[in-house]
Amino acid sequence: MRHKKAGKKLNMSSPLRKAMFRNMAKSLITHEAIRTTETRAKELRKVVERLVTYAIKNDVAARRQAYKVLGNHGMVKRLFDEIGPRFASGGGGYTRVIKLGAVRTGDAAPMAIIEFSKKAGEVVLPEEKPAKKAAPKKAASKKAEPKVEEKPAEVAAEETPAAEEKPEKSEE
């Protein structure tokens, strides 16, 4: 019996499973999202979340631990320079598994997409509190909006006579 055994074996030996997760982690870091089976995605999430936690620590020991898993200095650099800063303010949940509802032809395995929860442009800094103070400024900008609306109305009035003149020229 497999009491208190964490993780799935995925019908492969330990070295094959380790190599598969290393390759899938490299692909996820490179492409930001990959398509695989649901079970593999759920197991890969454990590996990738640990790597992102190393990237948030951002010290030499963490880089060496990440290199042990990835085995590529370029991947470690991308992980620490691009992916780690995205999640610096968060506390876990760096990846999401989206079930596709489709099955793979051949063996009917349920498929899923695993991706990072924050995209490349979504760097959230911990300075969100000053943004709430900017709300009164928005009220001042609403007063300026009626002035902006009047100008496009004048431009539209100027365009309509020009549009009327064009059909007259085509009739001649």
Image (cartoon, rainbow, N blue to C red):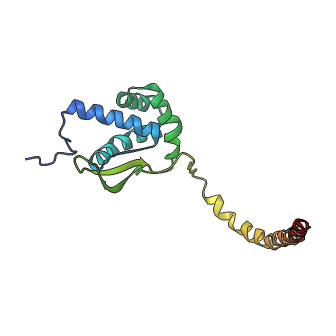
78 relative position to 129: left or right:
left
* Figure quadrant of residue 61: top left
Q: Nearer the viewer, residue 107 or 100?
A: 107
x, y (%) of residue 44? 32, 43
21 relative position to 12: left or right:
right
Q: Nearer the viewer, residue 111 or 40?
A: 111
Q: Is residue 62 above or below residue 123?
A: above
x, y (%) of residue 144? 81, 70
Q: Residue at position x 45%, y 51% from top? A: 117
* Figure quadrant of residue 157: bottom right
Quarter that holds the C terminus:
bottom right
x, y (%) of residue 2? 11, 46
Q: Residue at position x 54%, y 45% from top? A: 120
For this orientation, the residue located farthest to the front is 172
* Figure quadrant of residue 162: bottom right
Q: Residue at position x 47%, y 36% from top? A: 79
x, y (%) of residue 87? 49, 47
48 relative position to 88: left or right:
left
Q: Residue at position x 46%, y 43% from top? A: 32
Q: Is residue 58 above or below residue 98?
A: above
Q: Nearer the viewer, residue 47 or 105?
A: 105
How many numbered marks appear?
0
30 relative position to 133: left or right:
left
